Image (spheres, coloured by chain):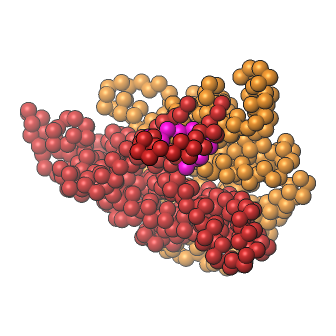
Chain colours: A red, B orange
Amino acid sequence: MAQRNYPLYIGLLLTFGFILIAIFGPSLAPHDPLERFNNAIFIDDEIYIPSVQPLLPFTLEMFPLGTDNAGRDLLSRLLWAIRPTLLLALVIVLVRVVVGLILGLAAGWYRGVVERLVDVLISISLSAPILLFALAIILFMGERTLPTFMIALTTTGWASTAVFVKNRTLVTIQAPYIEGARAVGVRPRRILSRYILPQLWPALPALIAFEVGTAILVVAELGFLGMFIGDAFVLMAADPGSAGTIPVGLTADLAELGQMLSDFWSKMIRSPWEVVVVGLTIFLLIFAFNMLGEGLRRQMDVTRPRRVWWRNRLQSAQPAPERSAAPRMTVDR
Amino acid sequence: MLGLILRKIILILLLLPLLNAVGFYYATIHPRLFVSPTGDTVEMSTSRYGNYVRGVLAGDLGRVGNQSVASILADPIKNSLILVMTALAVAIVFGLLLGLLSISPRTKRISPQALIVLAAGSSMPGFLAGGMLLSFMVYQTLYAGNPRTFLPLSGFGLDEHLILPVIVLALQPTMYIAKVTAGLVEHELQQDYIRVARSKGLSWLQLLWLHALPNMIAPVLVTIGESVRLIVGALVIVEALFIWPGIGRIFLFTVGLRLDARPPGVYFGNPDLLATIVVILGAWLLLADLIASALSYWVDPRLGLANEHTEIRLA
């Protein structure tokens, strides 16, 4: 009995949706994501001034999701925000995976000092809470630029990839064909590139998808704590006690999901819907990549019974009954 | 096994002083310190750390203003431990339960519905869940005209004040434990000995309890150790969110991060305080790791299996 790979379908659907938003979202946005609406809007004898009192969702057709706590259109900001978040996460993940691949291969291939060294590095970076470590590095460097974030998020993040690659390499290296290749006199570099690396490729898409989810999560967490790339301004609001205005919070400029979570306290009071909407978006984004990873993992898992629709088509085109019988042998229950 | 525990203990004894030194050094050269209100720069000399170490050896952990670090941290440590322990207990119980429930007895695989729930749960980090929950409740009270909240939003107490922080703190570890448990059970149920047991006519529960579970206690213990890391990592944010007077909140003050945009307080950049906090948090993590791995080796001494299980957990 074959199962459909629902996680893959859901993951692909959501991921493609988000990628489409990342590409076309900014041109679909109804307003400028940075524009604060200072002017009063008169509708039905009611006066709305978004920058003074943020608008609730669905109050005005102009602002379908309402405005954020500084009076900017929330929908436009959301449509703009997917692109930088995804790009940042992708760049981080690429560095992590490459570093993890190299170190994992080294630990799996070499015996002795290199293996010990990489093992110690892995256990150190696995034991450090990634958020606290990243926070410490960003605070320490004192500047919020892309290189700082890259360093902070990739110094420890490569460890899970490295563990995976190392274990895979250790398993592969015991295979008889590696022994054969050695006996024939194939050079180590060629064994690595010809026999060991190809064993890793099938697992890599799932690994990357999971890592993208983790990276988005850490970026969002840092943004929540007020650590983001870009400028911020002090938001002033009317003081209920006096006639003047008082600073309410430090609000981020750029439309990026992590930054939109920053300044939580003033947002919680002034525009709680913003936190909920942005939080749901981040949740869906992470969920999409986790589902994609899970689906890819299942797709690559050969022990899992599955339905391969195109295989039957191929069979009807060119009959080869023996070949199609072989994979089904594993499915008896 | 004794060798392993000894090695870990030595590592702990090496790492904790290192953490202490790094924390102290970090607080002294923290770049924001250079714009301190008094305008003076803190000198980065070893003699200060020397003084500190001499004080620690004499039983004095240092002081902030005229309060001693020990008196500042005594209550927060207790409060944080209460939170961590409750969250850990909740995560273990519900995680194992959810993990076992997500296996379909018919197909012996993780059922698709459970898979989606598990993936959704592990995509919902604690701070996001907490922030959204808090915002929704504030929305209810301020904008939807419903002044009473179902649960207290913030503050300390060993009653219903504990519920929201524990839910938020335990959410991710629960899902993590459930996911790993489900994966392990699924893997175990594909083995040949299970087929033999089934052909003997054992029931589903007997199969699970007597045959599959004993084989996966060791990796589950390691997972629980890892979920302590998740909890302690999230502790800082959760305490800040719910204004829980614990050690994580003081840590944020010391590093100079506040969720509300107020100026940093007296704790900001205090080396004695930061060094102690870092050692305490690190000790919790390392001790959890030590206990978990010691228990798991005690339960299952076959070292060779470790690699296989890590691979399952990762993939």
Does A5 sit above or below residue B52? above
Q: Residue at x 51, y 30 (%)?
A: B113
Tell me where residue B199 appears, x and y as whole percent: 76, 24
Tell me where residue A124 appears, x and y as whole percent: 69, 63
Question: What residue range appears in magenta?
Answer: A300-311
Residue B83, picture quadrant: top right
Residue B51, picture quadrant: bottom right
Residue at the extreme front of the image, as rendered? A319
Q: Residue at x 70, y 56 (%)?
A: B282
Tell me where residue B267 appears, x and y as whole percent: 58, 58
Residue A233, picture quadrant: bottom left
Q: Residue at x 72, y 51 (%)?
A: B308
Q: Is residue B306 magenta?
A: no
Does B263 sit above or below residue B40? above
* Quadrant into which the N terminus of chain A falls: top right
Overall secondary structure of the magenta stretch?
loop
User: Does residue A114 appear in this view?
Assistant: no
Instruction: State the residue in front, A90 or B54.
Output: A90
Tell me where residue A177 appears, x and y as whole percent: 71, 65
Instruction: State the residue in front, A180 or B171.
Output: A180
Does B148 sit above or below residue B214? above
Q: Is residue A301 magenta?
A: yes
User: Does residue B184 appear in this view?
Assistant: yes
* Quadrant into which the C terminus of chain A falls: top right
Q: Residue at x 45, y 40 (%)?
A: A312
- Does B25 sit left or right of A92 as displayed? right
